[in-house]
Amino acid sequence: MLCNFKDIINKKVLEKQDLITMLNAEGDDKVLLFKKSREITDSAIGNKVHLRGLIEYSNVCVKDCLYCGIRKSNRKQERYTLLDDEVTQCAQYALDNNYGSIVIQAGERTDAVFIAKITGLLKEIHKISKGALGITLSLGEQSPDTYKAWFDAGAHRYLLRIESSTKQLYNTIHPNNALHDFDNRMASLHNIRKAGFQLGTGVMIGLPHQSMENLADDLLFFQALDVDMVGMGPYIEHSDTPLFEAGHLLKTKQERLNLAFKMIATLRILMKDINIAAATALQAIDPMGREKAIKYGANILMPNITTGNFRNNYKLYDGKPCTDENPADCNACIDVRMGMIGSSVGYHEWGDSKHFKKKQTKNNIVWEP
Ligand code: 5AD
Ligand code: FES
């Protein structure tokens, strides 16, 4: 029997074809999709948005992803690594501004000096915040021992985007070598979880050669992996990368943005109580991109709190927003921006994934950060 759109979004079990129909929704159907995902967000999560102050620790990277502006082979990119004091100043900024959590993000490095440096910084941040700041890491593929060491040093969430869950597509956007191996990335996701972290992943939306089917598979992948958090945003070309030169863009920036919103809304309907971040890349296309994403189902905002001098150099893609401003410029408008869309900010709260908490209760695990 043919179902109408309303029946589809209300189905108990969503199948791949349903997800594709949802991702293709336009006009009245799209309005229904966004309305449904808002209702689910309100009942499963509430209207509170939680902040993660984003510290872009370093743009030094040993990898060469074909889409990324800070890839190793981009010689035009000046490199930086924050000093320890600068990192703790950022953490202090987060504390002073009542943020519940921070994210430490950097290009990928797996050398012993880097690993020890991060471990030390985690301990220091834990000390100055007296354990009050939740810490998420986004530092790429590491060994199981490294994940464990960083978890033991005080981080408790980890983001590692799979970029695309379709191996064939993943291989078209990465060099074909051991450092960029799809299966290793998958294994890392499992190792992150095993170390004890709340697990986050995500994909880029609107990649060259990416189909609606690929995106529906990404959503089913998040569900199968039972992730606690997702961060996903539109692919935005960077002019100094091989993927930009290769062309083959199927969609305009606006179309990629529109699709990203529909991915967020569809994911919220599929996985009701996970944390979904409103990615910065949304704002690079539309100044209100992150606010719209929150309206359509996201519940996490990651304002950049990296000290002003360096944020110009963390350019993953062209047109990255807010790079010339100081963190305070962004902070001043967060409450107003959230108020405009009927949301409030959960200051002082970690805002952990409700999905993760539920799983723990089910397994009788008591969480003590
Ligand atoms: N466009 C959009 N997102 C990008 N990222 C890297 N390069 C780009 C780009 N050109 C995203 C990747 C990575 C995250 C840190 O930033 O998904 O995992
Ligand atoms: Fe640095 Fe992809 S280019 S991890």
Image (cartoon, rainbow, N blue to C red):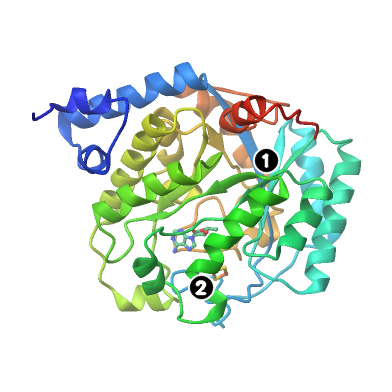
Q: Which residue appears at 24% of the width and 27% of the height? A: 31
Marks 2 and 1 sit apart, C-alpha to C-alpha, by 39 Å
Q: Name above or below for residue 144 compared with residue 344.
A: below
Q: Nearer the viewer, residue 211 or 336?
A: 211
Q: Which mark is residue 328?
A: 1
Left or right: where 244 falls relative to 11: right
**Percent from the top left, x then y, of residue 233?**
42, 50
**Please, what secondary structure does the residue beneath circle 1 have?**
helix
For this orientation, the residue located farthest to the front is: 363
**On the image, which quarter does residue 369 sit in?**
top right
Q: In the picture, which quadrant includes the N terminus?
A: top left
**Percent from the top left, x then y, of residue 313?**
61, 66
Residue at mark 2:
181
Q: Residues within 10 Å of mark 2 (few under 14, many from 20)?
A: some
- Mark 2 or 1, nearer chain start: 2
**On the image, which quarter does residue 224 sit in?**
top left
Identity of the amino acid at label 1? Ala
